[in-house]
Image (cartoon, coloured by chain):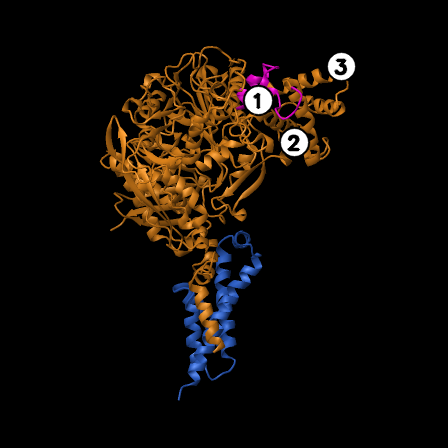
Amino acid sequence: MGALAVLAGALYVGARRIGPAPALGPFLDPAHGVWSLARSAVLPANASARVLNLGDSVTVVYDDRAVPHIFATTEEDAYRALGYVVARDRLFQLYLQTLAGSGRLTEIGGAGALAMDRETRGLGLPRAAERKLAATDTTAFAKIGVAYAEGVNAYIKQMPASELPIEFRLTGTRPPEWQPIDSYHLTNRMGYTLARIATETDHGAAAARVGNQAADALFPDATPIQEPIQPNGQHGPRFDFHPLPPPGRGDSTALLLASAGTAFLPAHALARRDDDDPPSSMASNNWAVSPSRSANGHALLAGDPHLDLSLPSIWYEVHLVVPGKLDVYGVTIPGAPGVVIGFNRDVAWTFTNTGTDVLDYYTERVDDAAHPTKYLVDGAWRKLEERIETYHSPSGQRLAVDTMYFTHRGPMRRIGGHWLSMRWTVLEASSEAYAFQLIAHATSAAQVEDIMARWYKAPAQNMLAADRTGHIAVRSNARYPVRPGDGKGNVIRNGTASANDWQGELPVSQFPQALDPAQGYLASANQQPIDPRVAAGWWGGSYDPWRALRINELLRANSAVTVEAMRGYQTDPGSARADLFVPSMLLAAQSVLARPGQYANRAELADARKLLAEWDRRYTTDNRRAVLFEEVMREVVSRTWDELLEDPAAGSRRVATPSTAVLAELLSDSGSVWWDVKSTPQVEHRDDILAASLVSALRTVKGRYGDPAGDGWRWDHVRFANIYHLLRLPAFSSLKLPVQGGTGTLNPSSGTGTNGPSWRMVVDLGPEMKAWSTYPGGQSGNPVSPRYDDRIPSWTKGELEAIHFPRTPAELDASQRGALLQLFPAP
Amino acid sequence: MILIAVVALATALATWFGGWWGVAVVALVAGFLASEHPSTPWRVALGALLGWIVLLVVDAGIGPFARLATALGGAMSIPAPALLLMTVLFAALLAWSAATVAAEIGRLKP
């Protein structure tokens, strides 16, 4: 009887999940279970598979960096094979990204993921994917998208049990069939990540506390430091510093604006509140030099998009060859049927994010405030689209049901007694993946820009290209709405009048752009793309000038740029932000120390000043002073913007934080009332705040890291890169990696260490294309594979690896070859 | 000794070509056929344990097994050796209980 009970128990735990624990039988099975992953950690030297609808056989040669070189006879077959190899290396990532993009994370994460899914569906992202797919089902992309899906599904169907990724085993899930719509979920997810820029949120929150005039100055349409992407002929940055108007009476009506952002984008709004600068996830760099400014007389191009770091990486390196038709190398995002950043035999391209605000809100009048069915436009009622969204648990149980409403503008929701709708370019019809397929064929930098201007709509990107004939070009390509009236995008418009709708799209001629500028180089680093003095239209958004200042400084100073210099710039430890703030801090300390009378913290201030003066303003890993500067900056921000605290008495969080560019602007006005700390009886000025910040920062840093001469102050003991596994499992993550760089440097390092350069590439556009790259991860998604994280060492050191770019399989010599995969048509 | 070897081989093959439930099937058959020996369940359990050890050795011989064990243990917050022990004990427990039940049934034979 006892044995029978044990048998029943063993069979039960063998077959069924209990809580988070997987079913033990299939999990522990050494032939097919988790232990068998050891057998699939390395790709077999020779493998073959049959793929449905493959026109002809395809040869895939993996090189010594585990990059698959796909040799096919048609483009459709090449993309079919791309789907296959991506699934082979990154199957769980494909699955998880689809869940995230379609708002179905609860199906793997349970109720804990409900808030994220509600945000995704509440924004209408899955609905937009459906509409985009329906709108493109007759284009050439549809064929490629279907071919890609067939490749993914061919792998899933033939996958040996031993290759089922470990994450599926731990979560008790199985990979579903890949659908072409999943590619749209992915591109929508990129839009969500990069284009959720609603300037109205911060502006509204600030206006509610300090009035509209002050909010206009704290969150300006034009950043006060101008070093635009489209060269403005000034040969240097321009500092448009003006005194900030004093805080005024709060405008309670602006609260609706702030609430709109929080309601539609709750996760994003929460993250923004404590940031001193625009979110680092939106940071990226790219630059190119003309032959006239390169040492070898070729155009050179560099790019490093900064995104959330993850294992496996967001990028997958690949080479597609169809003789006479296609020969493109670069990185794809698993799920995207195309090479996103890369090069072919003639031209190279890379992107940074354009932080322009392309998201607007409208107040709507509805027929029934509790259960609306219609909304009013130009005096006539229009029917609301209703959509029921159901969320399921991993076991299939219904977790929640939401009713979503949509106007012709986009999703609509009730906020503070008002019904607000939202319009966002990410939700509009577009063909980003098709654009990537087309630029793979581009033959010139200008052609890259023209293809993208026509087909690429969101998220807005500063697209830099260089070609072998020596041309360099940049254009901030996207759909930019033309708004009525003053054209501003940081206000709520009245939805009852169609005259308040977007009036069309900005013509390409008005996009920020440049082709072969006289200065001989182009650079973008998420700065405001066009000088507001020459721009037609409104270019408000979220911009960061510091990296742009630094890369422009470096490029101006070097008229014979080399590939090695380009590589070095990508991890340059210099900081334009420190160059601007440190002198002011030192002068302020000197000024306070020179005042007559006894300054209470004189010794500490002198000590802090001395230590900061010792800093070379570089964020090298062994630097022992950067930590002090960062703490001083945190103190300055905290003390200066006390007017923006949610509850000043409680010292709670700020409702919004102006950028450090605005703080720099404030530095030029030593007597501004913004320096005064409202909670103290005395009136503080700039130097008081800077001095007090120095003293306080020194105390904090000493308390936290010990003696200034000790190793505790080393930058690599303070700031790290943290590359988490997609499920944030520490055992599969790579944490506390020392990196050279800090806030606002070209190789930025955020406080959490979870954002950073997700791909680095340098291309030499000589007679033969040469390129070098790395990324923080590896080609395999299998945590046990030696290819899972093999590139992290080169990434942390700022090194690049030479890329193989063969025309035929035979051009890869034996030492450069890895595994071979042959794909054959299924009978 | 022969029973242990046969069960080990049969368990390895059944698991390889079938799945984890092959352990129970082999144990049921072995337990039933050798039901007259009181020690059969323990010997079957040992055979199943050895069968899975053989399969684990095959895994270890082909790929980075130590790295897998460490990563897996870390992901599940269990020391890697404990996870390995759990694996083979699961097979042994399953086999022992199945063989015991089968032996009881076998002893009911007229």
Q: Colour of chain A?
A: orange
2 or 1: mark nearer the eye: 1
Q: Which residues are magenta?
A: A659-683
**Residue name at image x 50 percent, y 66 percent:** B90
| Above-or-below relation of A450 to A180 | above
Which residue type does callout 3 highlight?
Pro
Q: Nearer the viewer, mark 2 or mark 3?
A: 3
State the residue in front, B5 or A308. A308
Q: Is residue B18 above or below residue A802?
A: below
Q: Secondary structure at mark 2?
A: loop
Badge 2 and badge 1 both on one subunit: yes
Same-chain check, marks 2 and 3: yes
CA neighbours of label 1 inside 10 A, class few (<14), some (14 to 19), many (20+): many
Quarter of the view holding residue A366: top left
Q: Give me the disc on residue A622.
A: 2
User: Which badge, 2 or 1, is on the more N-terminal residue?
Assistant: 1
Q: CA distance from mark 1 to mark 3?
A: 31 Å
Residue A806, quarter of picture: top left
In space, the residues marked 2 and 1 are separated at their CA atoms by 20 Å
Q: Mark 1 or 3, which is nearer the eye?
A: 3
